[in-house]
Amino acid sequence: MTMMEFDGLAINSGRVVAPACLYSSNLHKSVDEYLVEETDIESELLRFDSALKQSSRDLEAISTRVAGGLGIVESEIFLAQNHIMNDAVIVRQIREIVRNTRKNVEAVIFEVYRDYEEKFRAMDSPYLRERVSDISEIRRRLLDNLKKQKPGFLCEGQQHCQRGAGRIIVAEEFTADMMAHMNFEHVRAFATEHGGISSHAAIIARSLGIPAVTGLKNITEFAKCGQRVLVDGDRGKVYLEPKDEILSKLIAVEEVSGDQKVYIATPSGMEVLANASMLEDVKQAKQLNADGIGLYRTEIFFIKSDRLLSEDEQFAHYTRVVDEIGDRQVTFRLLDVGGDKPLPFLRIQKESNPYLGWRGARFLLGNPDIFASQIRALMRLTKKKRIRVMVPMVIDENQYSMVVAAIREVGQSVEMVPENLSIGAMFEVPSACIQAKKIFKRADFGSIGSNDLIQYLFAVDRNNEQVSADYNPEHPVLWDMLEAMATASRETRKPVSICGEMAGREGIVKRLLDIGINSLSVSPRLIPQVRNEMAVYAEEKESLPILDPRGFKQNAKRIKV
């Protein structure tokens, strides 16, 4: 078949090739409109009542199923939709329009919810604009039940249907309802026609660490179930039936199979950690024998909950994380909100450029109550095990010192074990990298967030197609800065890791090891690949003059699969 290329918006990076799995949500772009007889109005309203009750039962059942399979936070999406759908004002409005106009209930539902969608689209907040998907999903569910239709995979019911497992989900829009229909933890990537940077698809894709691209106009009209698809989440492109030369260029690392060796432990003096956003990531990292969690994104729990979380709720969640990973290290990044991670329920003042605004360490210092609640929850963990806490978006030594002082002050009111707490800095801003040696003297460790560092270093928005070519992990200027960071780490004898996406790119591992950065934190799915590259590097070198950040030696073991 002829290759087709689609341009869209990257909402999570990474590249993967796999068969397509098409999902139809019955979006009901239009409905038939007609007048009902005066004597049939009550029957029409009974149809509406029946659809409303059935839709409520559906949402309650899905919420229960998702709570057991994915978690309480994810299930709350459906409870919120149920609450909106049964809002007395909306229900009364629909019933009154049916009575007053004699229009069929499908047409009235379509009209009322379309008006709400338009109101949400006109709002200033990007987050609220993207909540249009929830309104659309409620409308779709009501119309489905009126028409006796059900959403699902196009091949559902057929013997070969995988329900998304090992497949790339292709859909018009990622809806919350899809979570209940697919083998979620095994999905390889998302490719959708609609959705934004804070949509359900974006949040879930980032949580799962899988590539995702949206804004792919009319892709569902051309894609077919089982068709080979390449999702390029780095450049925001999707290919149907990609040519071999495209595959060899973009998907350089083959899946491990046959007689290839798989290393089940990291070579001595090196470290392969996992980036995680939810408990499922931690479970996967443990299964893949990760050396620990190098970056746990605490803000994702808040984003999914769509509200502020109490100290006890946070403590319970963090406890599950450390219990799951066992005796391996966990690095909790403090709340990193702003930019592509808004917390709309805080009603933060709108910023013209949130990526350069009130985020990271600035946000923490400016919200002492939220900050203190999280610190207390984390410090309570120290009675259980040693943990690491990382300060996001540090701009210089002074700011880092202010955050650490605030952490120490909160710690005086918490029963904790001080020696079980390490505090580190995240290096994402060029000014912090320039002051790396000064910051390392105050910090217990450091982590390089290459995603933001590259964007700020080269003034490039990688989601902007006009300038995304300048988002270049190979640029010599970046490597000069990374080498300077590694030197500062050695001179101060403070360990440094790199947790950005470049750490998982083929060929980058060797270059990082060459300059002395030997601790890499990547998406769980990339752990075998990175560990294999480290092991090959170790075999090629008779000795490795690098600092062992874990303080113990571990010999590499390998097996054949």
Image: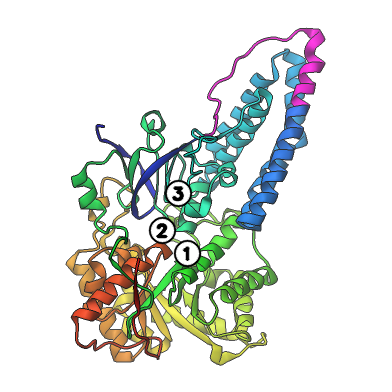
Give the left or right position of residue 26, taking residue 495 as reference: right
- The magenta segment is 24-49
Which element type, helix, strand or loop, lies under badge 2? helix
Q: Position of residue 61 (x, y in %)?
A: 71, 44
Mark 3 closeness class: few <14, some 14–19, many ≥20 residues within 10 Å: many
Residues at marks 2 and 3 touching, judged by CB atoms closer than 8 Å: no
Name the N-terminal-most of marks 2 and 3: 3
What separation in Å lies between label 1 and label 2 (alpha carbons)?
A: 8 Å
Q: The residue tagged with tag 1: helix, strand or loop?
A: loop
Q: Which mark is residue 551?
A: none
Where residue 193 sits: x, y (%)? 42, 36
Residue 416 versus residue 507: which sits nearer the camera?
507
Picture disc at residue 359: 1
Q: Quadrant of residue 561?
A: bottom left
Picture coordinates of residue 425, whole percent (x, y): 42, 78
In the image, is 425 to the left or to the right of 323? left
Residue that numbered label 3 is attached to? 197
Q: Amino acid at mark 2?
A: Tyr
Q: Is residue 36 magenta?
A: yes
Q: Is residue 80 visible?
A: no
Q: Quadrant of residue 220?
A: top left
Alpha carbon separation for disc pair 3 and 1: 17 Å
Nearer to us in this view, 253 or 99: 253
Q: Is residue 344 above or below residue 334?
A: above
Question: Is 80 rendered above or below residue 315?
Answer: above
> What residue sits 65% from the left and 73% below the top?
315
Is residue 378 visible to us here? yes
Quickly name the residue at label 2. Answer: 355
Looking at the rendered image, the quarter that the N terminus falls into is: top left
Colour basis: rainbow
For image coordinates 62% across by 69% down, the residue present is 317
